[in-house]
Structures are given as C-alpha cells and as structure tokens.
Image (cartoon, rainbow, N blue to C red):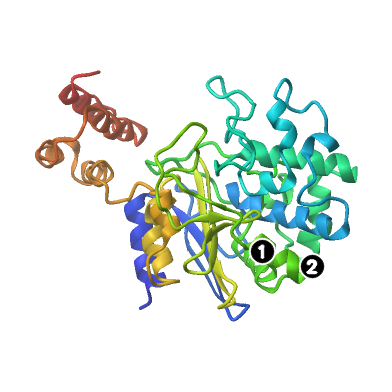
Amino acid sequence: MSFWDAGLPQLMNEALVPGASLAIIRGGRIAEVVSCGVRHSRSPLSVDENTVFDAASLSKPIFAQVVLQLVDQGQLTLDTLLVDQLAGYIANDPRASSISVAHALSHSSGLPNWRSLEHPLRTYFSPGERFSYSGEGFLYLQRVVEAVTGEPLEGLAQKLVFEPLGMTRSSFVWERRFEANRAYGHDVFGTPALGNKPGEANAAWSLQTCAVDYARFLIGALEGTRLRPATTQLALAPRIQVKHRGIESLGLSEVATTGVAWGLGWGLEPGAGTFFHWGANGPFTAFTIGSLQDRSAFVIFTNGASGLSIMPEIVAHFSSGERPSLVWLDFIPHEAPARRLFRAALARGAEAAWPEIESAALQRDELIWIARGLNARGRERESLWLRERAGTK
C-alpha cells in the first residue's frame, strides 16, 4: 500500500485536516491525482480531483503569469514604475514612486504584507533593497494592470491563463457553480470555520481552483506556455536573495543563510533548481513545488488550517532531499508538544492526559490553546478544568 493510500490519511488525521487533493506531474504530464478525506468534517461527501479549494497565495504565481504575458505583449515592462500608471495609490511616500513591476512580483517593494494599524500602507525600505513578502505589492500591481488594460483581473485571467490552459474550474471570484463540489474550511482544531466566497478578485489570495486545474497551470509553467523563452527564464531566475528568517522583514533583521531566493511570482531554491509557493488563508492551506529541469511538479490543497504542519512529510514523498523552502517557512509541525497533547486530550480526556501534559512543562499560553481547542470541540467541562490547571478561567 502506497503512502498516498495509507500514510497521507494518517497524517491528515493527526493534523486534524479533513480533506486534501493533490496532483503530481512527471515528465511534463499529470502522473497521479490523489484525493483524500471529506469536504466538510460533518458530511460524508468525499473530496475528489474537481473539488474547489481556496488556493490562498497560490493565486500569486497565476497573477504573475498574467503580468508576464502583458510584458511580452509590450503593455508593460519589468521596469515600469507603478506610480506612472496609477498615480496617488500610495500618498505622501516619495520612496513608493520607485516601485516597479519587478519589485512587486519579487516581493521587494518595501510594502507590508497587509496594511494594518501597526503597519499602514507605505514603504518600509527602499524598493529593491531586500525581500519582504507583500500581498499589498501584488494588489498594487493588480490595480496597475487593470488601469493599463482597462479590464478586471478576472477577465484577464480567464483570457490569458484559465481558458488557454483548460482550467475550467478556476476563478479569482466565487462562482455559484462551485457550490456543488467545494471544500469547506476548518480551523487548527479541526472544527468548521468561515471561508471565503470572494466577490472581487484579489491577485494575492482570492483564487478558487482544484488540484487538476492547478496542475495544468504548473505544466504550462514547466513548458513556458504563452511566454517567450527569455521571459520564462527571467521568471524562474533569482532576482533577490532571502537573507532573513520569516516571510516579512520591514525593519532590520538578523542576516541568515536560507537557501531561498525570489524570482517573478515564484519562490526559488537555487541550489536545487526548484520553484515553490505556499498558501495559507486561515482554514485553507496549500503548497506547490516544481523543477524545470526534471519537468516535474507537485501541488496540494487542504481544507484545514493545520495542513502546513504535515507538509514536510508529504513533500518528501514527491521529492527527496532537504527543502530549504520548508526549513525557511518553519511551519509548526503536527508533532509539536501542544498539538500532540491536544490530540491526547481529545482521545483520552483532559484529566487522563494531564500527567503527560504536566510533565511536558508547557507554557501557560500553550495550555490555554489546548483548552480553547477542547472548547471548540464541544468539551466545555474539560476546557474549564484545564483552564483551572493553567491558573485562568
């Protein structure tokens, strides 16, 4: 029995991930499609290869493909300054006037991942100076693309990517036809959570798709479909090195050797010759990785917020060797003490699991996290009991 038949379901069960769908590409062709689990934890409906998931940040490489086609058509260049096409988007920030198309695609714009009270929309370093993951940079570029072409992103994506590649179950906005076969999101405790039905396209996160459709896109990326060969090479060539831990570096960060770089829309493992991206929109998680040289790729979508906790084990069954991308991303593993002991409390009860929990010397916030999980699973009495042990109610 293969890993996909036995090992994957076991990992998903341990991580409290209800469902997953993945596709493996070998030699530039879809070699295997694996679907596992259910669309909703309270429903017997199984995930299949056409089940639509929230792709989260796996949206970004597809948007990059749209942009690069526009570059090949001469509507933009990689050096086009965004302010020249859309003035006033970022006010009172002289540095923002030097953000280019390439800066946005390579996450070197200087903008935060998402604006907030702590980090309002402005540059935090000179564009091109270093890497700092930025959904805002992609959204800014989206607005520029829409201004230049006079078309909304959804229409452009359909015309330039989805239709040519046969991606019939993909859209940057929610479509009612997806309802009959969609995945429902679940939180880290495996309980149903609110998902997204985006009414407006967002280049950074709103893609709705299925494993087979995304595999068709990956084949296009491997083949350089609809792009000039030189443009494909640029997209997958290191443009900026990632020299810090964590995805954002708005302030000065400790310099670190990560083995990761960024191209145009793709993360890169230069030493291995591979490209990658991950996705995490709360209750949906995803990961993809591929090799241009081997003409191979892998993509997986899950409907659980803990999906990334088992990604190293899953990816290892597609591609052997150390993965700098996964080391850099440093997802909390499903076997982390708090997660493992939460499962023990679910299985045996909080009081029965307490000696093991106590001996693990967890931090107070970890105990509270386990208590929150028990409450989410309808175990209110045990949750209260554990909160009392943690010194809080």
Which quarter of the picture shows residue 13?
bottom left
Mark 1 vs mark 2, CA separation in Å? 17 Å
Q: Amino acid at mark 2?
A: Arg
Residue receiving disc 1: 213
Spot the residue most to the right: 150
Q: Is residue 47 visible?
A: no
User: What residue do we see at 72% from left, 51% from top?
Assistant: 171
Nearer to the camera, 144 or 195:
144
Q: Would you identify the image quadrant in which residue 323 lies?
A: bottom left
Q: Position of residue 234 (x, y in %)?
A: 68, 62
In this orientation, does residue 253 appear?
Answer: yes
323 sits to left or right of 293: left
Residue located beneath label 2 in the image: 226
Secondary element at tag 1: helix
Vertically, is 32 above or below 240? Answer: below
x then y, percent, for residue 79: 77, 48
Residue 78 vs residue 14, the one in the foreground: 78
- The kind of residue on which mark 1 rests is Asp
- Binning the other alpha carbons within 10 Å of mark 1 as few (below 14), some (14 to 19) or many (20 upward) gives many
Of the pair 333 and 302, the residue shown nearer to us: 333
41 with respect to 386 (left or right):
right
Report the residue at 46% width, 33% height from top: 252
Mark sitting on residue 59: none
- Labels 1 and 2: the sequence-earlier one: 1
- Residue 317: name its quadrant: bottom left
Give the label, 1 or 2, closer to the camera.
2
Q: In the image, residue 322 lies at what x, y percent?
A: 37, 65
Q: Is residue 149 rendered to the left or right of residue 46? A: right
